[in-house]
Amino acid sequence: MRLRWALLLLGVMGCGSEAIVSQSPAVQVVPGPGLPAEIVPQIANNNLDVVRHDGRIYFAFRSAPTHFASVDAVLWVVSSTDEQTWRFEARFELDRDLREPRFLSWNGKLFLYFAVLGESVFDFEPKEMRVSERLADGSWTPSEPFYQPGFIPWRTRVVGGTPYLVTYVGGENIYDVDGQPLEIHFLTTQDGRNWVPVVPGQPAVLTGGGSETDFAILDDGSLVAIVRNEAGDASGWGSKICRAPASALGTWTCVHDPRKFDSPLVFRHGPDVFLIARRNLTETGNYDLGMRDLTPQQQTNKYLADYSSRPKRCAIWKVDPESSSVSFVADLPSRGDTCFPGVIEGDSPDEVFLYNYSSDPFGENDPAWLAGQLGPTQIYRQVLRFPTP
């Protein structure tokens, strides 16, 4: 049953033409009456992914006491044909923090990847990446480590029949400028379990402060990527907009953006490239406040403290690959702790179905991000409609 469309039309100028995005009302999924009895949501329901596979929609999400690391974190997997009534699929629990679930539907198989972290509420402690495969009988294999220790999977996708994984290492150094630089690796696979560099012998495409990264492949085979640069490096703090030619997908060149596009999700609609990521509710939206009179460590601490004390939104942005720039389109229903989006193709070419988490997006309060991280969060579903190119 199609949702009633909200009367919201937002004009966006880009690439010489006007694009319109309309939003349906947001409907809460977690906690929700359509979940199977096996699912027991906790207070914080956040990190998620969604994919179409073999006639069903698969949905994975993290549930824990708060946004922060917890040994009580659980990854739940459910599936549905109508996105209203869900069937239990799997539960993953390892007495450590689990997050960043990522599906890959490829060659008739369905894989789930996720990150295993530590036990401390106060530290980001990446341990390993794990993979589980859904078998023909409906069971899921026990999760097992893959690739290299210390990595975090950020985005999987299939483009032109080729599977890709963007992952990063060094996350434990994000808030410690004396630590080793982070590396972003760009990988592919032939079996869903063993991942190798897209460009043989060149796993790292960026070294510095970049971590969460997503990308799109353009019609000419070139690449555009959005990189969260929270750790900071010689370019500054915030984000990077990167390009790579089709002939050298492992050679990324980047420009600095002082805004921090947390949890980036990049997708194409026709010739256009869109980004869904967190937005900082300040006059400029900047994460990098340009305090170059401070030491790098002082800047890292100052920028994080200021950012954490501000309200947030999850927003739609438009990416211009030619100018390596990002322009704001619209906010999604979101407040407090929010923005870890997943999208799938809709029922028609002009639609995508969006899943996202947030503190109560409809209440009177507009809490700071840190306050939201300590409180309840729910997962919502929306339909976004774009004009047919």
Image: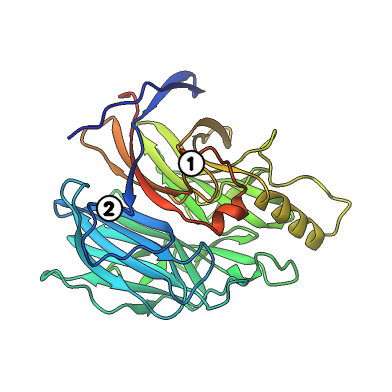
Q: Amino acid at mark 2?
A: Val
Of 207 and 122, the residue lying toward us? 122
Q: Tell me if residue 143 comes above or below residue 138 in the rendering.
A: below
Q: Is residue 68 left or right of residue 153?
A: right
At 49% across and 73% down in the image, what residue appears? 70
Q: Looking at the picture, how far across and down is residue 1, in whole percent?
A: 17, 35
Q: Looking at the picture, how far across and down is residue 363, in whole percent?
A: 49, 39
Of 55 and 322, the residue lying toward us? 55
The residue under label 2 is: 51
- Numbered circles on residues, count: 2
At 38% across and 50% down in the image, what residue appears? 379
Give the structural element (helix, strand or loop) at label 1. Answer: loop
The residue under label 1 is: 334
Q: Can residue 156 be spotted in the picture? A: no
At 62% across and 55% down in the image, what residue appears? 370
Q: Can residue 11 be spotted in the picture? A: yes
Q: Tell me if residue 217 comes above or below residue 130 in the rendering.
A: above
Q: Looking at the picture, how far across and down is residue 197, in whole percent?
A: 44, 65
Which numbered mark, 1 or 2, is in the foreground of this view?
1
Q: Quadrant of the C terminus?
A: top left
